[in-house]
Amino acid sequence: MGQDGLPGIKEIEDASGQIAGVASRTPLVESTALSRLTGKQVFLKLECFQPIKVFKIRGAYNKVSRVKERSVVAASSGNHGIAVAYSSRLLGKKCTIVVPETAVQEKIEAIEDCGASVVKAGRSSEEREDMAREIARTDGSAFIHPFNDRDVIAGQGTCGLEIVQQLPDFDTVLVPVGGGGLISGVSIGLKGMGAAARVVGVEPAVAPKLTAALSAKRIVHVDPAGSIADGLIPSALGELTYLACSKYVDAALTVSEEELMGATSVMVNKARIFAEPSGAATLAPLLSNKEGLGGRVVLVVSGGNVSRDVLRKVLA
């Protein structure tokens, strides 16, 4: 661990060994359809091909496998909860997931399919985290934070490690941003491996916590509105993820709800990749011709747990 509390490349390499056989080494492939459409070489890091269809398995398993407690609890809008529940099932741990009252039903079902208990609490990330921490205090469970945790960040960093190993020459990596765990890990992994590529975060315009933090040079709490990218609307970065982003992330871009829906539609209908809006968000800046991204661009497609409602709209 570095003196700043962040994991280094050694911790990410250790995490790669820890999650081997559980998380997949996902494909990194050029989408010729998206390259033709955008006039760039567009490569997709397909985290939607993980066993649970989302990158979160990397950090969740790395963390859950290291805690001594036999029960765990997490707060999640869905995907982190699925990952913690799945990891707990493999490791024989009891698991409780606190979700918002507005959680996507398909994600609740996926959590319950792994044998975890689901508790609903409020609508904000703060409300569900408070409930999860209270459960942890009451029954002695380990609380598994979705992003502000060294082991979680190290696990997500294995995605960045793979990108460098799979594609040695690229200009920019676009990464979706919720609480910042994925972009923190990816940026540490890329920079730790000596990659010169820019790391750019993409977040909903209704929840611009990374954009605001980089501008203000401190953690900024925003009041996010609802978004079809439900995994990208925490109100703030964590202390660790802010530190990582301030050191290793080059820029942040915001995208509108219309752009998110458009990117999801193109990803499904043109690239033939079933990405949820949170995962398709990285395509949006290319479709709107944002400048400064270079000619060879990697899009991290972070998840594919698309709701039936969104999928119906996209296919229509």
Image (tube, rainbow, N blue to C red):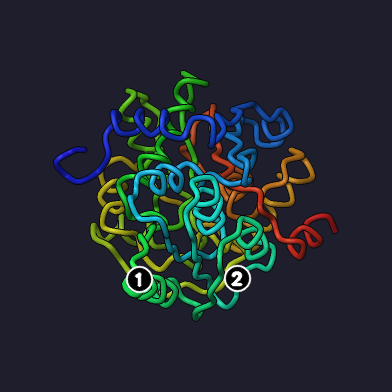
Badge 1 density bin: few <14, some 14–19, many ≥20, Cα 10 Å: many
- Residue farthest toward the left in the current orientation of the protein: 3
- Counting labels gives 2
- Residue at 43%, 63% in the rendered image: 73
Upstream in sequence: badge 2 or badge 1? 2
Q: Nearer the viewer, residue 60 or 199?
A: 60
The span from disc 2 to disc 1 (Cα, nearest Å) is 19 Å
- SS at badge 1: helix
Choose mark 2 or mark 1, whichever is in front: 1
- SS at badge 2: loop
- Residue farthest toward the right in the current orientation of the protein: 316
Q: Mark 1 is on which residue type?
A: Arg
Q: Position of residue 172 (x, y in %)?
A: 46, 33
Q: Nearer the viewer, residue 212 or 95?
A: 95
Q: Is residue 288 visible?
A: no
Q: Is residue 135 visible?
A: yes
Q: Mark 2 is on which residue type?
A: Ala
Q: Position of residue 70 (x, y in %)?
A: 40, 55
Q: Are marks 2 and 1 in contact (CB under 8 Å)?
A: no
Q: Position of residue 197 (x, y in %)?
A: 40, 29
The N terminus lies in which quarter of the figure? top left
Q: Nearer the viewer, residue 65 or 217?
A: 65
In the image, residue 27 sits, relative to residue 235, either above or below, namely above
- Residue at 34%, 49% in the rendered image: 67
In the image, residue 50 sits, relative to residue 255, either above or below, namely above
Asked if residue 127 lies left or right of residue 286, the reply is: left
- Residue at 30%, 66% in the rendered image: 220
Q: Position of residue 87 (x, y in %)?
A: 51, 48
Residue 133 tag number? 1
Residue 103 tag number? 2
Residue 250 tag number? none
